[in-house]
Image (cartoon, rainbow, N blue to C red):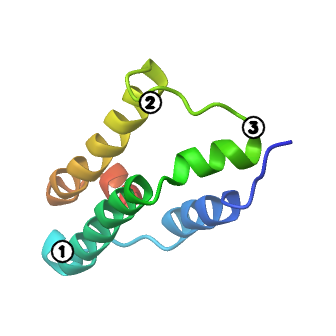
Amino acid sequence: MYRVDFYPGFFGGYLLWIFVAGKPSFAYIRVSFWVSFSLFITHRVEEKIYGFFDRLSDITGVKTPAISSWPVILLVLVSVVAWVAIPVLVKKGHAFGYYLA
C-alpha cells in the first residue's frame, strides 16, 4: 500500500498557486529561496551520513536502488533542474517558476 501523506501539501500548494495569484520579484523571495535550498542540501547530506535509505530498506524490505540506476539518476536530475530553474524562471516572470518556488 502506498502512503499519500504528502499529497495534501502538493495539492494545497497547487490550489494556492491557482487562486492566490502573485508575481513577486526574485529579490523579494531570494532569502526564502536560498534558505530553503540550503536546508534541502543539508537534508540530502543528512540522509547520506545517517544511512537513511539503508535503514528504510531494512524496515520496508524493499531493496534500495543503486545510485547509478536510471530512476535514481533521473530523480536527482529533475530535482537539481527544478532548483536551478526557479531563479531563472521567476526572473523571467514564468508562471511555472512561481509554482516551483
Task: Give the mark nearest the N terminus, 2 or 1.
Answer: 1
What residue did someone put label 2 on? 72
Taking 74 as reference, is 98 above or below it? below
Q: Residue 28 occupies which quadrant of the picture? A: bottom left
Secondary structure of the residue carrying tag 1 is helix
Q: Label 2, label 3: how many angstroms apart (C-alpha)? A: 18 Å
Q: Quadrant of the N terminus?
A: top right
Mark 1: which amino acid? Arg
Q: Label 1, label 3: how many angstroms apart (C-alpha)? A: 41 Å
Secondary structure of the residue carrying tag 3 is loop
Between 93 and 69, the one nearer to me in the picture: 69
Q: Residue 33 occupies which quadrant of the picture? A: bottom left
Judged by depth in the image, the label closer to the viewer, 2 or 3, is 3
| Residue at the image point whose x is 59% and y is 59% from the top | 10
Task: Give the mark nearest the N terminus, 2 or 3.
Answer: 3
Q: Position of residue 39 (x, y in %)?
A: 33, 70
* Horizontal relation, residue 42 to residue 72: left or right: left
* Horizontal relation, residue 23 to residue 27: left or right: right
Q: Which numbered tag is attached to residue 30?
A: 1
Between 39 and 82, the one nearer to me in the picture: 39
Q: Label 2, label 1: how many angstroms apart (C-alpha)? A: 29 Å
| Residue at the image point whose x is 61% and y is 51% from the top | 55
Q: Which numbered tag is attached to residue 59?
A: none
* Horizontal relation, residue 20 to residue 74: left or right: right
Disc 2 crowd rating (10 Å Cα; few below 14, some 14-19, many 20+) is some
Q: Residue furthest right?
A: 1
What residue did someone put label 3 on? 61
Disc 3 crowd rating (10 Å Cα; few below 14, some 14-19, many 20+) is few
Q: Quadrant of the C terminus?
A: bottom left
Q: Position of residue 23 (x, y in %)?
A: 29, 69
Judged by depth in the image, the label closer to the viewer, 2 or 1, is 2
Disc 1 crowd rating (10 Å Cα; few below 14, some 14-19, many 20+) is few
